Image (cartoon, rainbow, N blue to C red):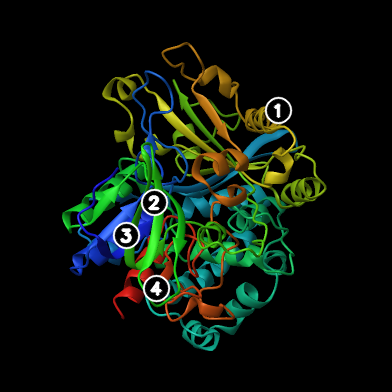
Amino acid sequence: MTSFGHDVYDDVIVGGGHNGLVAAAYLARAGRSVLVLERLGNTGGAAISTRPFAGVDARLSRYSYLVSLLPGKIVRDLGLEFAVRKRTVSSYTPVERDGRAGGLLVGGGESRTRESFARLTGSEREYESWRAFYGRTGRLAEKVFPTLTEPLPTRAELRARIDDETAWRMLFEEPLGRAVEEHFADDLVRGVVLTDALIGTFADAHDASLVQNRCFLYHVIGGGTGDWDVPVGGMGALTDALAIAARAAGAEIATGHEVLRIEADGRAPAEVTFRTATGEGRVVGRTVLVNASPRTLGELLGETEPAAPVEGAQLKVNMLLRRLPRLRDASVDPREAFGGTFHVAEGYAELARAYAEAATGELPSVPPSEVYCHSLTDPTILGPELVAQGYQTLTLFGLHTPARLFEKDNRGAREVLLTGTLAQLDAHLAEPITDCLAFDADGRPCIEAKTPLDLERELRLPGGHIFHRDLSWPYAQDQGAAGRWGVGTPYANVLLCGAGAVRGGGVSGVPGHNAAMAVLGH
């Protein structure tokens, strides 16, 4: 059985994903005794890099893949050896109109973007609306993003800080679809805007719950700019750096330790029971931080009330190509088109139809997705020989595919959906994507797909939900015991430090930071 350095730790952290590692590093640097217990044989959770294809020297960000919400403050505070790179193109969205292949390119300079809008829509109006809309969200981002690592503001305080009633109304009070339809007339442009409200979120543009608004908000405030950057070395470079920082500060990290239960009354130190390959053990923590979903936290605490259902809604596909495919729109270099976000079947009407079909239990007939090529911005994830031969990675993220669609036959539904999704991509290519795939050492094509049920099985994400549950507003509301930092539970010495905390979601480290601040009494 495992032998630890202390009988009683100041802090026991359940889960060695990036948020747990952030908390461990902060707490250990404050001189506290810290133990991290991780179920898997490695740290990192969903923010890892792996070589998924046998015998191929390509280290891919297998699950999480871009960085926007990670505050520079955390990188600086912890002295992380980690960097991101900007993408020169924000997005390219192919479309066929009047029998001609074209598309919308956003990026590469203002003049190119303006010209692309005019060529697509026939006027300057949509581009001016685009500039006004994202100018407003950009000003909002500058004010909201810094609050993520501060004590929770009240709703009134955040509203006053934003100081823009139009922005407040369109993002915090009315379904986002209303603002999209008021600002934009072109169906394709509307769809490109809406996609940021649907990443990992199954909702209609006019959903009265405003879950789509919350998703959109977190996608446009990152870094105070809304930019989505490429992690140099892959996502695993971040979590490797965090593990190094935590250990250097004195934290102990034990992988292969699955936590089974937490016994806590909120006053006395909590007892944590875990399982390893050799049996069960126990460890005591004055404080326990849980880097897992709220549903998992309830199960560990032995709560008998059934947790609210949680459901993810995405398809994740990783590919390695021998070359990038040629496009039907010959006016755009594939290196630019795939260097940013390549939107497929994401017109406004297409997104609405896909949602409606999935809501009735059917796989979308025209599956929407978005694709990007990490290796164009950061070739370090590929071995030198692959780089020399022109190999590239492709990451595809499919929308509107809720877990319920895979419950009867996960494997069969996955194959049908993958085939349909690639067919939509092929519609805009001058050659099938399968003709460009590399092959592994066993002669198999280098492509893998993950449904929500796959993510639930592999990562314990409830229902495959990449945010652990629906995203929250970044202010204090009826959160019960969430407390000053949004990480509290009904037990004073048990805190939630994962994506399901208030202001959690994405690769941010924010819940880990905030849980550490709560422990340290800040």
Q: Alpha carbon of mark 1 to alpha carbon of mark 4: how far? A: 45 Å
Residue 493's disc number: 4
Which mark is first along the chain, 2 or 3? 2
Residue 17's disc number: 2
Which mark is first along the chain, 1 or 2? 2
Residue 174 visible in the snapshot: yes
Callout 3: helix, strand or loop?
helix
- The residue indicated by pointer 3 is 22
Which mark is first along the chain, 4 or 1? 1
Callout 2: helix, strand or loop?
loop
- The residue indicated by pointer 1 is 412
Q: Alpha carbon of mark 2 to alpha carbon of mark 1: how far? A: 30 Å
Residue located 36% across and 37% down the image: 278
Q: Alpha carbon of mark 2 to alpha carbon of mark 4: how far? A: 20 Å
What kind of residue is marked 3?
Answer: Val
What kind of residue is marked 2?
Answer: Gly
Q: Is 74 placed left or right of 270 in the picture?
A: left
Residue 128 visible in the snapshot: no
| Front one among 334 and 320 | 320
Residue 498 in picture, x, y percent from top left: 45, 60
Kindly indicate whether the residue at mark 3 contacts the one at mark 1 (C-beta within 8 angstroms).
no
What kind of residue is marked 4?
Answer: Asn
Q: Alpha carbon of mark 3 to alpha carbon of mark 4: how far? A: 18 Å
Tell how many labels: 4
Residue 324 in picture, x, y percent from top left: 47, 26
Residue 291 in picture, x, y percent from top left: 43, 58
